[in-house]
Amino acid sequence: MRQRLKNFEFFGAPHVAIVTTDRDQGTYGAIDCGGYVANLLLAARSLGVATIPQAAIAMYAGHVRRHFGLPDDRLVVCAVSFGYADTSHPVNRFRTTRAAVDDTVVMVGG
């Protein structure tokens, strides 16, 4: 729980990008944001900048909108905290596992 709450401190990163989309775009806007975020993470990595994508703040979109003065027609999709990683901190050595493709993808047709 303590680690989860660090989402709302942006994990101590010196910078954060708040990713939003026009409410009228609905699912399409969220998909576009996903592509944008993926490329932002890759571009940052190529420059040696560490990133943490954070969907958790979307649960508190009203607070985020008020704090940053965002209009109500913007959906808060996620945040991306970024900076240079403290490689000596134990949390930065933690790695998660990934599910196998066969466990997550169903091929239909041929």
Image (cartoon, rainbow, N blue to C red):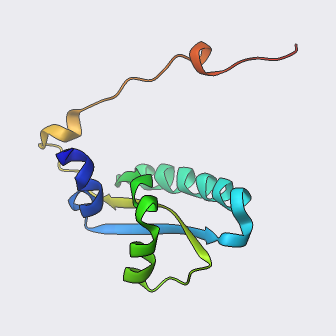
Q: Nearer the viewer, residue 12 or 24?
A: 24
Above or below, 8 against 22 in this view is above
Residue 63 location (% of width, % of height): 39, 74
Direction right: furthest residue: 110
Task: Using the rendered view, name the quadrant where residue 84 is placed.
Answer: bottom left
Rendered-image quadrant of the C terminus: top right
Describe residue 34's horizontal placement relative to residue 89 as left or right: right
Residue 17 location (% of width, % of height): 43, 68
Residue located 32% across and 68% down the image: 15
Residue located 30% across and 30% down the image: 95
Residue 1 location (% of width, % of height): 21, 44
Residue located 54% across and 55% down the image: 37
Above or below, 66 against 77 in this view is below
Describe residue 90's horizontal placement relative to residue 43 as left or right: left
Residue 28 location (% of width, % of height): 73, 57
Task: Using the rendered view, name the quadrant where residue 21 is placed.
Answer: bottom right
